[in-house]
Image: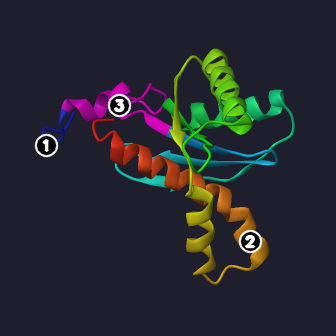
Amino acid sequence: MPRNFPAAIYNYRMDAPADPARRRVLALDVGSKRIGVAVTDPLGITAQGLETIQRQNKRRDLQALGELLAKYEVREIVVGLPLRLSGAEGTQSEKMRRFADDLHAHFGVTVHLWDERWTSTEANRLLRETDLSIKKRGQAVDRMAATLILQSWMEAHPTH
């Protein structure tokens, strides 16, 4: 072993589980047709949008999410909670609570619900300022909304 390299470099394995402190947080903007997805970087500093999941059925949606949890070594999930402008919960909020319960039961990870009011509106506003076509903008709004949900959650939880 060369002297100028620390021994820890030689102990690193690509298939070794990530340090729990560096595992990522995944955020979801769940709609009836699509799920916008964002994930933190390995250090938990930034939020990055991922490919939007086209919803099919519960089994396939959970399969797609499971693949992302494994790929990004996710330790926690943040699900956008749709509240009314008054802050009260409605029918959609209850659906997201059930969805969060399903995620926790299926994957065994901590699931947080986070107020998503205005995220889709803000995502649409930001995307209107780009040169994206209306079709591509529509495809990107869920990903952008998930990114905004995750950024907001990260700002409120700086120690994660």
- Residue at the spot x=56%, y=51% of the render? 117
- The span shown in magenta is 7-25
- Residue 136 — which label? 2
Graded by Cα atoms within 10 Å as few (under 14), some (14 to 19) or many (20 or more), the crowding at tag 3 reads few
Pick whichever, 118 or 130, lies toward us. 118
Q: Which numbered disc, 3 or 2, marks the residue that appears first in the sequence?
A: 3
Q: Which residue in the protein does label 3 denote?
A: 12
- Residue 4 — which label? 1
User: Helix, strand or loop at disc 3?
Assistant: loop
Which amino acid type is marked by label 1? Asn
Q: Nearer the viewer, mark 2 or mark 1?
A: 2
Distance of mark 2 from mark 1, alpha carbons?
Answer: 50 Å
User: Helix, strand or loop at disc 2?
Assistant: helix
- Residue at the spot x=49%, y=28% of the render? 15
Pick whichever, 86 or 74, lies toward us. 86
Tell me the quadrant of the picture where the N terminus can be found: top left
